[in-house]
Each structure stands twice: as structure tokens, then as C-alpha cells.
Amino acid sequence: MTCNDANFEHLAERGLPQGAAGVLDLEAALRLVRGKPFDGDAGAHTWAAPLVQTMNTKIVTVAHTIAFQRIQDEVLDIDAARHAISTGLDVEPAAEVLYRDWMRVEHRAGNPVALRQFIAQVRQMAAEMGFDDVQDKTEQLIQQLTTSRGTAKLR
């Protein structure tokens, strides 16, 4: 078996502390992701469950960081932000932080239809996962984005 985890780890460690200057390394790391780690071998690699969770967390962190950076003026690229989020959600469909990122991206892009779509999707995901509601941070962001005017600075 071969694994790009070492390459992913190297690029992520190099890119994460650099802010906007590290976004290309992070995007290169995310390009190494081909679906969920160990996908297709369910049960065959139960020994790898902790490793898979660690890999998923790293992938979500990288996707989140790319999305955050790519809505900043100095490295603005809405499509790159969307792609990073999509890749992260393919790996970890319940990563609410990525839904928040997607809402920020669509708000930054001035796309209220897509913003409403992702608000609905995060609420649906929470219900399907058996959660009572979305996280408080998500609810606060929804309120902020749906009541704000223009492209206010988002946290």
C-alpha cells in the first residue's frame, strides 16, 4: 500500500503557519487527497481507525485554512475556496466548520441564493446526524450573514 499522507503532512506543516503565503502549499497538499482515507476497506483496517480520524482532522484543517485565506483580498479566489471546502466535506461530511466556511465564501461572493442553500444544508446535516441543532458558532454566523449588509468583515 502506498500513502500520500507523508507528503500531505509535509506540505500542510509548511503551509499552515505561513498564512496567505502558505496557501499554495496547502492547495498542493489537498490535491493529494483522493476520497476518504482507507475508503472501500471498511472493517478490513480497524487498526487504522485512529489514524483515519487524525488524517480526516488534518484534511479538514487544511480545507478550512484554504477557504479562510482564499476569501482574503490578497489571495482572493472564490473557486479555490469552494474546491477546498468540497474536498474537505467529501472526507468529513459532518465538519460544520466547513459549512460555516462555505457560507462565508458565498457571502463574500455576493451569492445570497447559495448562502441560503448552505444554511439549509448545514441544518439538514445536523438533523441527519441526530444533532438537536447546529453549533452555536454556526447559528451566530447565520444570523450575522443574513442580517448584515454588503461584504462586512467576517470572523
Image (cartoon, grey):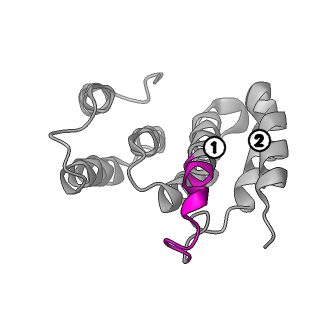
Q: Is residue 66 magenta?
A: no
Q: Give amino acid for label 2.
A: Ala
Give 1 or 14, whichever is nearer the viewer: 1
What x and y, as percent, mark residue 56?
Answer: 57, 50
Q: Which residue is mark 2?
A: 12
The residue under the point 56% across, 64% down is 36
Give 34 or 77, whichever is nearer the viewer: 34
The residue under the point 63% across, 51% down is 51
Q: 7 left or right of 111? A: right
The residue under the point 56% across, 76% down is 41
What x and y, as percent, mark residue 79?
Answer: 59, 55
What x and y, as percent, mark residue 80?
Answer: 64, 53
Image quadrant where one finds the N terminus: bottom right
Secondary structure beneath dot 2 equals helix
- For the residues labelled 2 and 1, the Cα–Cα distance comes to 8 Å
- Answer few, some or many: residues within 10 Å of disc 2's Cα (few below 14, many 20 plus, some between 14 and 19): many
**Furthest-bottom residue in this view:** 40
Q: Earlier in the sequence, mark 2 or mark 1?
A: 2
Q: Is residue 52 magenta?
A: yes
Helix, strand or loop: magenta stretch: helix
What x and y, as percent, mark residue 137?
Answer: 33, 26
Q: 111 left or right of 136? A: right
Residue 148 in the image: above or below residue 104: above
Secondary structure beneath dot 1 equals helix
Q: Which residue is mark 1?
A: 58
* Residue 72 quadrant: top right
- Answer few, some or many: residues within 10 Å of disc 1's Cα (few below 14, many 20 plus, some between 14 and 19): some
* Residue 62 quadrant: top right
Residues under numbered marks 2 and 1 in contact, where contact means CB atoms less than 8 Å apart = yes
The residue under the point 84% across, 35% down is 14
What is the span of residues highlighted in magenta in the rendered image?
Answer: 41-53
Q: What label sits on residue 144 in the rendered view?
A: none
